[in-house]
Amino acid sequence: MRGLQAAGGAALTGEADSPTPPHRRRRVALLAALAVVVYGLDLATKTAVLRTLEGKDPLVLIPGLLQFRVIFNAGAAFSIGTGMTIVFTIIAAGVVVAILRTARKLRSLPWAVTLGLMLGGALGNLTDRLFRAPGGLQGHVVDFVEVFPSHFPVFNVADSAIVCGGILAVFLAWRGYQLDGTRDGGQEKAPEIHKAEEGSQDKAESRNDG
């Protein structure tokens, strides 16, 4: 009986000392913080340009290279698919839900950054689709950043975050990085997780020796 209690106690103690739960919480916290920053920047910049530039001539910052011009986009990022507003609204909502569900198994720093960018961007444009005129899942996204005028689609902060997050996601998948912090199907663990687990094992061995 004592042996069973000792074994049970060691298992419980090992679970309590496991670095995985706080490790995951830190990654989720980073994801959430980055999403809030992206969402806040997107909302603030859209509000500012609407107050100062709506209905006015473009604000030229670098002639022939960069200017601010307010347009209302019914399509996806970079004005793609302007006739499918409802479809893109549903897709954006699905992306938000998928990222929130994925966060439950997140232990990778690079993936936390990737998903934070994508979540903040998706929420920014989804807010426009839900609350901008004409509304009813058909709201128009506010775009205002125009590089190489007349040669490149107008975009916003949310679009930039989504594109950057998508590029990072492709790179991480190509390199074999997993959401749980492992690499190549779990064969190689991220250095921070490996060190944390080694520390946990050392603590357990010290208690057993005592």
Image: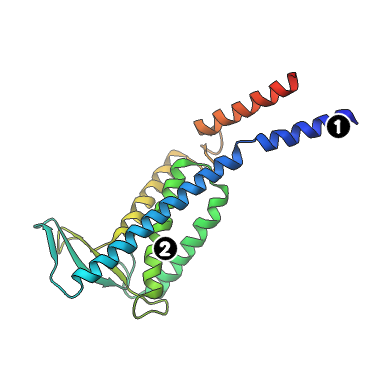
Q: Is residue 31 above or below residue 186?
A: below
Position of the N terminus by quadrant: top right
Q: Is residue 68 above or below residue 209?
A: below
Number of dots carrying numbers = 2
Pick out the residue farthest to the left.
63
Figure quadrant of residue 7: top right
Q: Is residue 91 above or below residue 136?
A: above
Q: Secondary structure at mark 1?
A: helix
As drawn, the label of residue 29 is none
Q: Of label 2 and label 1, which has the lower sequence position? A: 1
Position of the C terminus by quadrant: top right
Q: Is residue 85 left or right of residue 191?
A: left
As drawn, the label of residue 123 is 2
The residue that label 1 is drawn on is 4
What residue is rendered at 69% in x and 26% in y? Answer: 204
Residue type, numbered disc 2: Leu
Q: Is residue 162 left or right of residue 52?
A: right
Residue 19, image x and y in percent? 60, 36
What residue is rendered at 78% in x and 33% in y? Answer: 9
Asked whether 153 or 121 is in front, the reply is 121
What residue is rendered at 57% in x and 31% in y? Answer: 196
Q: CA distance from mark 2 to mark 1?
A: 51 Å
Q: Secondary structure at mark 2?
A: helix
Q: Is residue 116 above or below residue 50?
A: above
Residue 96, image x and y in percent? 47, 61
**What crowding class fits label 2: few (fewer than 14 Cα within 10 Å), some (14-19), or many (20 or more)?**
many
Residue 191, image x and y in percent? 50, 30
Asked whether 22 or 148 is in front, the reply is 22
